[in-house]
Amino acid sequence: MPIEKVILAESDENLRRTVAEFVRSKRIDVAEAGTVQDVYGYLGKDEFDLIFIEAKLPECELIDFLGDLNQRSEKPLVVPLVNGDPDSFVLECIKGGAFDFLSKPFSREQIEIALHKAGNYNQISKTNAAIVESSVDDAEREILGESQLIEETRKMIKRVAQTQVTVLIQGESGTGKELVARALHTQSPRAQKPFIKINCAALPETLIESEFFGHEKGAFTGAVAKRQGRFELAHGGTILLDEISEISLAMQAKLLRVLQEQEFERVGGSKTIKVDVRVIATTNRDLEESVEKGDFRQDLFFRLNVIPIYVPPLRERVGDIQFLAEKFRELFVRKHGVSVEGFSDAAVESLGNHDFPGNVRELQNVVERAVILCGPDGSIEPEQLNLLGQALGQPERQSAKGAKIDEAAPEKDGFPSMDEVEKEHIIRALGQVDHNRTKAAKLLGMNVRTLRNKINAYREEAESEEDLAKLGDKD
């Protein structure tokens, strides 16, 4: 992440001007200071990435100055300019928080190296702050399965990963689209660079531009400090635009420019920022249909859809269900420190008969719950899988003749459609978590916005107060 703004604090006016001129030639803004009061004045008005400061600047106790900077939430890196070889004072400064030092006389090449090191440090620190890695087993990041469909997906990833091409990953919620995106990154030449994810569906419209491109201090109410956006943090690496179909048409136009020109401006800024980023997007919608409806720009679709990868739902690779269930059992046995030997024949049959509208994520949640609830004999039974979504501890209802009643089954003749199965599955999930949509979305393996949209659609179709009650309170 290049250095953008520097304070150069040096009492020797000729040296200060010479260095400032060189730094400005690198397209970096420089504020010149002759006293420590000047430095504090600049820091009170603006944000800076780096301070070159004369170690013996008049009226400046450098150790105290470093201590003051350490109290700031947004603090620039500090490089003292010292006379001669480093001594104990320089070491004390490094311990006090100085980033580096330059010994006078220094060359332009040494200044350039210091700027480069500071820029690299900024990118690493800001990128690490943006990446929130969950503490999961590596197996949860694997693309698991033995079916021909999933093997073809793995082959496609291997072929495409070595290129720089933009990829659009399509598939239902819970199929593993993010795993495919991560595999494209880790198998690419950019593997050692940042992998930055942004969930487009989880961000309000008012914040998404700032999340994408960053903002300058004072760009809007609440922008109390400069902030780098996700595209900037992903420089040199890969950015994943999760659920790309959820962004507005206005935002789509701005995103199109980044894909075409690899440049943008921060919100409230005028400086054009160049980036080298590989873009991977995911969607659980049919984007071609969205284009026809006017909800998605055709030119952006063409830019994203250079290489499409389809991730099949679990119902299209039924043969993988038992294999995946066993892998997840092994994973959660290690994670929770319990003893579970395997699945009973009845449990295997129950898994095979379930449609899994939540796909692999639903299967993963089901197996984790079963591992936790498994009895002392170490064999998972259908009741621990709880595929009917019955609340734990709730007795099963029975008819007058003693037959079990599945309250979740659609009360209509004929085989239910996938839409009906999905609706009933969502209703069961809502009932299990007392209609908490956030918890229901996590249980189902879908984002909250997608779940909310489906619930609102179901409310419009509801024919009775009882149907509405199953969906919970309206937003």
Image (tube, helix red, strand yellow):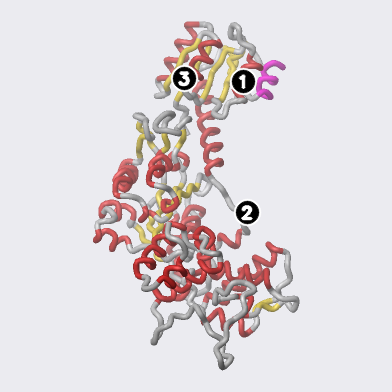
State yes or no: residue 462 in magenta. Answer: no
Q: Which residue is mark 3?
A: 45
Q: Quadrant of the C terminus?
A: bottom left
What's the residue at 58%, 9% (across, down)? 57
Amino acid of disc 1: Asp
Question: Mark 2 sits on what residue?
Answer: 135
Mark 1, residue position: 68
Q: Nearer the viewer, mark 2 or mark 3?
A: 3
Secondary structure found at label 1: helix
Residue type at mark 2 is Ser
- Residue 11 vertical position relative to residue 184 in the rendered view, above or below: above
Cα gap from disc 2 to disc 1, whole angstroms: 35 Å
Is residue 365 visible in the rendered image? The answer is yes
Q: Are marks 2 and 3 in contact (CB under 8 Å)?
A: no
Q: For label 1, count other residues whose C-alpha is less than 10 Å away and answer few (under 14), some (14-19) or many (20+).
A: few
Q: Nearer the viewer, residue 309 or 298?
A: 298
Residue type at numbered disc 3:
Lys
- Of the two numbered discs 1 and 3 on the same chain, state the one appearing first in sequence: 3
Task: Name the side, left or right, on which 292 lies relative to 265.
Answer: left
Q: Earlier in the sequence, mark 2 or mark 3?
A: 3
Q: Which residues are magenta?
A: 88-96
Residue 159's place in the image compared with 207, above or below, is: below
Residue 468: x, y in percent? 42, 68
- Give the Cα separation between the discs numbered 1 and 3: 16 Å
Residue 170 at least partly seen: no
